């Protein structure tokens, strides 16, 4: 299982890099849009493109956020509990988090498939297809589920990997 945890950690790191690149693209496009409008020109694709990039970075950055504990946690409650009860609380919250991201990934998959099959496009004159944006939800949350599995498995494998004293 150590190899699985390392693989998921590398995958989460790669997702963080991709999310960072998408955010950088969004920033560059927003700056471009501001400069163009300042000099009196406008186009219709920049804002929509920037929103696509920011939403995609949110979902693709999710596994890394979980890996680095950048998410909202129940740390305050854990400090009030005994170590044994705190471990159980952490385990329960991780299992609940896994269930939530799996459910949302499934809903995202359904929405992506529906959008793809119906050929949905945005309402703007640029009219890009919606399914690539929707696809980042099941991909990002599916990878977040893998990160949850690695976290849930960690305490159990740590005990197996430690020599008995």
Image: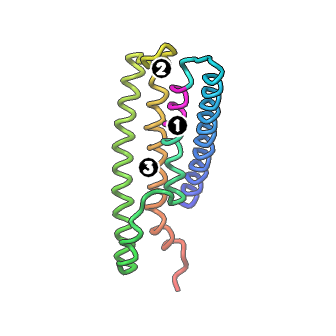
* Total count of labels: 3
* Residue at the far bottom in the pictured view: 165
Residue at horizontal 51 percent and vertical 50 percent from the top: 63
Identity of the residue furthest to the front in this view? 39
Task: Give residue 86's position: percent from left, percent from top.
Answer: 37, 74
- Under circle 3, the secondary element is helix
Q: Nearer the viewer, mark 3 or mark 1?
A: 1
Q: Which mark is residue 129?
A: 2
Q: Which of marks 1 and 3 precedes in the sequence? A: 1
The residue at the point 61 percent across, 40 percent down is 18
Residue 124's place in the image compared with 35, above or below, is: above
Q: Quadrant of residue 161?
A: bottom right
- Magenta run includes residue 145: no
- Label 2 element class: loop
Q: Nearer the N terminus, badge 3 or badge 2?
A: 2
Q: Residue at x 36, y 72 (%)?
A: 77
Which portion, as a residue range, is magenta?
47-55
| Pointer 3 local density, CA inside 10 Å: few below 14, some 14–19, many at least 20 | many
Q: CA distance from mark 3 to mark 1?
A: 21 Å
Task: Estimate the x, y position of residue 16 in percent, counting from the top left.
Answer: 59, 47
Give how far apart the Cα atoms at labels 3 and 2 are. 27 Å
Q: Secondary structure at mark 1?
A: helix
Q: Earlier in the sequence, mark 2 or mark 1?
A: 1
61 or 54, which is in the foreground?
A: 54
Instruction: Inspect the magenta stretch and tell me whether residue 54 lies in it.
Output: yes
The main secondary structure of the magenta stretch is helix
Residue 90 x, y percent position in the rendering: 39, 67
| Residue identified by numbered label 3 | 145
Does the CB distance between marks 3 and 2 fall below 8 Å? Answer: no
């Amino acid at each position: 299982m150590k190899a699985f945890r390392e693989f998921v950690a590398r995958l989460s790191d790669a997702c963080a890099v991709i999310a960072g690149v998408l955010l950088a693209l969004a920033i560059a496009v927003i700056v471009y849009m501001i400069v163009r409008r300042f000099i009196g020109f406008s186009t219709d694709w920049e804002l929509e493109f920037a929103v696509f990039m920011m939403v995609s970075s949110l979902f693709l950055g999710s596994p890394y956020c979980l890996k680095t504990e950048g998410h909202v946690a129940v740390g305050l409650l854990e400090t009030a509990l005994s170590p044994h009860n705190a471990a159980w609380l952490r385990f329960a919250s991780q299992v609940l988090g896994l269930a939530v991201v799996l459910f949302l990934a499934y809903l995202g998959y359904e929405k992506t498939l529906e959008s793809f099959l119906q050929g949905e496009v945005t309402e703007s004159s640029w009219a890009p297809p919606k399914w690539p944006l929707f696809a980042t939800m099941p991909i990002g949350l599916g990878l977040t589920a893998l990160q949850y599995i690695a976290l849930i498995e960690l305490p159990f494998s740590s005990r197996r990997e430690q020599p008995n004293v």
